[in-house]
Amino acid sequence: MTISNKIKKLLLYIVLGAVAIIQIYPLVWMILISFKDNNEIFSGNIMGLPKRFLWQNYVVAIRDAKVGVFFLNSVKVSVLTLFFTICLSLCVAYAISRLEWKNSKTVLNFFLLGIMIPSQAVIMPIYELASKTHLLNTHFLLICVYIVFALPTSIYILSSFMSGLPRELEESAYIDGASIYRAFFSIIIPIIKPAIVSVLILNFIGVWNEFMFAFVLINTDSLRTIPVGIQSLVGQYNTNWGPMAAAMVVATIPTVIIYTIFSGQIQNSLIVGSVKG
Amino acid sequence: MKMKDNKIAILVFTLPAICLYTFFLVIPIFASLGLSFFKWDGIGPLFFNGIQNYISVFVHNIDSFWQSAGNSMLFAILCVVIQLPLALILALVLANGVKGESFFRTVYFVPVIISSVIIGALFSRVYNPDYGLLNTILGKIGLGSLKRMWLGDPKTALLAAFVPQIWQFIGYHMLLMYAAIKQVPSEIVESAKIDGAGSFQIATKIKIPLIKPMLEVCLIFAVTGSLKIFDLMYVLTPNGGPLNSTQIPTGLMFTELFTNYSTGIGSTIAVFIVVECLIFTFLIQKTFKEKIV
């Protein structure tokens, strides 16, 4: 390798490294200040490591600032949304891609149109519905809305996986006397587990981070999900940096854990999900 | 298999989802459209007033509507000229096979999985005039004269609010483009190399033209995504920011709904956002079709 090539290589890595720092440092910074108190921050140690790790900030965030409550609400809403989304979209995807009927394409397109719809398109009527039916400040309506917005991409991903499977899979089962439902549960579902995992992860990140609907439909402290909870703390804990940062770290932990475990799968599912943008 | 079983099974499998989807998505879309032709405070009776809401918003420019639409348009343009090219360069470099390829890809992507509310709360700290990361760094590298109240100054607030949103999704577009570049058949690249093409030529003449479908997807995501931004903007500069300088259509929609109790005007703005996104999607698709043929 010539010297000029070596210099080029070096420059390239410097640039790539700099971009990596730009992308990751704000998050590292968030973790650093989550262990500091205001005295330390305001006396000049803004960027460096904390003098000592103030776990107290996390206690304040989780207990006093109710981040623990927000967290559990988010867990509940996410789990229920994921459960119903995966059940409903598996069923639809199966009917569309494995059963033969005239209008299957129409039904698929009906759902796929939903990918283009921004939440702004429905938020007013949903809010009015909520306030007229006492569904405001319930997780029920929020979950329904999340399911509906998760269905299009989920159905798209699952049905494109299922239609790639050979027909013979179920045919031999039918010959052995299995019903459609039997074939669905014991043949198709086990085979497409990887696709199911992708759909679950994709939807989990979306639901865990969703702000607009949660912000509009829920205004009781005890029912807030993580993003709305954090938003409500921004004003309240504006001057108290440590606990605020601790709250943000707690809110981020689940997605980061899932990302570290499934990073390859997350990247794949986003790519698959984007193809039919 | 009996035909009747099949029909019942299809109903069992699809009906629940279709009902839910119709009730919570399809009907509300039409309701939004319908409400935009009425005057309604959300509680009392509805008054049909034709296209009066549209005239108020588009012609009389209430709440400085066009300024907010212009802001979101400016954001879309910035995404297209800054975010996407950066993502493309990173994708090309990484897909070329550098050491630590998957490490860089994974790190660049991290901000994407984080809630935009967290990103907003974080950057409101970054921009803090006294103790924020940005002013601190500026002070340390001797550019203290540039220190300012980034989000409090109407001159800088809008751009300062755009930066984290551009920053957050570079990794997303990078990943999509990277995946597409990896699909380019290696024989084509190899034979170009044998013909003496440099890596710059291979990128511009072979790889970029071949990943056009993915570029189209990224362009549509970037443009429609910026036209409907809300979360991060709301956390960074609630209520339109200093002198309303960071107001965006979605923000206006919320003001109309929750502050002015004007469901009709709010719905009109909602219709505007949806139609605007559809038009841009259509235009981008059309441009790409013509260019490819």
Image (cartoon, helix red, strand yellow):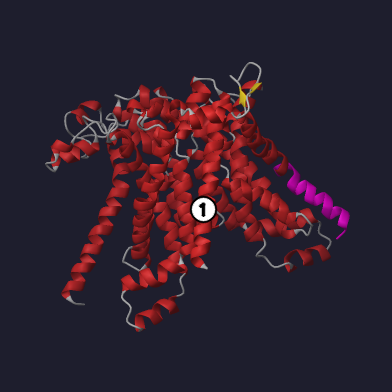
The residue located at (31%, 39%) in the rendering is B159
Residue A277 screen position, x and y as percent: 54, 53
Q: Is residue B137 above or below residue B203?
A: above
**Residue behind mark 1:** B283
Residue B186 screen position, x and y as percent: 43, 76
Q: Is residue A12 toward the left or the right of residue B245 in the image?
A: left
Residue B113 screen position, x and y as percent: 43, 46
Residue A174 screen position, x and y as percent: 81, 63
Considering the whole magenta stretch, tell me its main secondary structure.
helix
Amino acid at the residue labelled 1: Leu
- Check if residue B14 falls in the magenta segment: yes
Residue B87, visible in the rendered structure: yes
Query: A92 or A212: nearer the eye?
Result: A212
Which range is magenta? Answer: B1-17
Query: A40 or A205: nearer the eye?
Result: A205
Q: Quadrant of residue B55?
A: top right
Q: Is residue A89 toward the left or the right of residue A61 in the image?
A: right
Could you tell me which chain the residue with mark 1 belongs to?
A: B
